[in-house]
Amino acid sequence: CEREQKRSKNFSKEEDELLVSAWLNVSLDPVQGVDQSRSTYWRRIYDYFHNSKTFDSDRTQSCLMSRWSGILHYVNLYAGCVSKLEARNQRKNALRMFKSDKQHRNFPHLHCWEKLEDKAKWKNRSNQSGTISKKKQKTTTNSSPAAAAQLVVTANGEESQAAMPTVDRPTGKKKEKDKLRPCSNIEALHYLLVKKKEADKEKDLKKEERCQKAFAMQEEKIRIKKERNRNEEERIRLEKDKFEFDRNLEEERIMNVDASTMSTKQQLLYEQLKNDILARRMKN
């Protein structure tokens, strides 16, 4: 998003404040709460931002995430200064203390801090962060206010963890989920029944498809067998016709032979052949 911001204008005060409002409101949903994935969580923040804006803004989801990471870093540092000075009743000097640290020039997100500081979600998050980092803070009692604030950031882990706070659920969330649980069980049972019916239907379709394929293969085998039989019958018929044709030619030759020049035996032989030919033809 830093590259995107270099190509586009910087975030305005209105955009920062709306992003803070989105972060504060999204996870306060009585049912959704923190029980959602990082991508779903930030998709809801993105939707809240663009559905609630009253100004032109085309910030992407990744851009909003990156901006929130920067805001969170500086606000945590400033919160550390405020915490230090509240113990001394010198809260008005928090900005001066923040700027006095060599690592900081100014606090660019005061408008964000003013929206966050009195919200229950922010306080719960800060309290939890303070509990986690208590042991580390014991070893840094002489460190600067900025260093103490940095421990809050370190205890929170990376920005993705801060964006998904594990705070106590708002009042009414458990009751809301308890109300929904019977419905969820019924819906789950209905879902399983629907899936079973779909699986059975698919199984029946596959079985029918296999039967149809087997039937088609059997029909194809019968067709091929019949085709082979027809071809064989045709071959036999052609051979028979050829035999008859050749025999007729030979018989015609015998019937037309002039036996007058032959010997007596040859004449008797051809005479017998001619008689056999005539007898067969008369019979047919």
Image (tube, grey):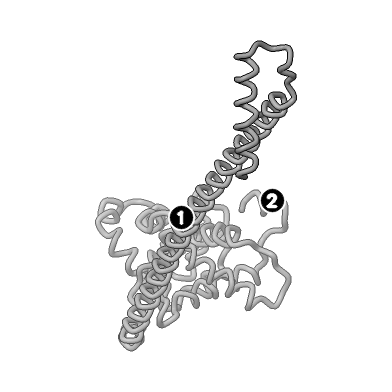
Does residue 223 appear to the left or right of 123 in the view shown?
right
Q: Where is residue 282, by image quadrant?
A: top right
Residue at the image point whose x is 42% and y is 77% from the top: 32
Across the whole image, how many numbered discs are drawn on residues? 2
Q: Residues within 10 Å of mark 2 (few under 14, many from 20)?
A: few
Q: Cβ–Cβ below 8 Å for labels 2 and 1?
A: no
Q: Residues within 10 Å of mark 1 (few under 14, many from 20)?
A: few
Q: Is residue 65 visible?
A: yes
Q: Nearer the viewer, residue 183 or 120?
A: 183
Mark seen at residue 74: none
Residue at the image point whose x is 56% and y is 44% from the top: 233
Disc 2 residue type (three-letter) = Lys
Does residue 258 appear to the left or right of 126 in the view shown?
right
**Residue 11: image location, x then y, percent:** 66, 62
**Residue 244: image location, x then y, percent:** 64, 35
Q: Quadrant of the C terminus?
A: top right
Q: Which residue does the numbered mark 1 point to in the structure image?
A: 218
**Residue 146: image location, x then y, percent:** 43, 55
- Looking at the rendered image, the disc whose residue lies closer to the viewer, 2 or 1, is 1
Q: Where is residue 67, by image quadrant?
A: bottom right
Q: Is residue 89 visible?
A: no
Q: Which residue does the numbered mark 2 point to in the structure image?
A: 6
Mark 2–mark 1 distance (CA, rounded to whole Å): 72 Å
Judged from the image, the secondary structure of the residue bearing numbered disc 2 is helix
**Residue 5: image location, x then y, percent:** 67, 54
Mark with earlier residue (2, 1)? 2
Residue at the image point whose x is 51% and y is 71% from the top: 23
Q: Nearer the viewer, residue 196 or 108?
A: 196
Quick check: 123 above or below 69? Answer: below
Judged from the image, the secondary structure of the residue bearing numbered disc 1 is helix
Disc 1 residue type (three-letter) = Gln
Residue at the image point whose x is 60% and y is 42% from the top: 234
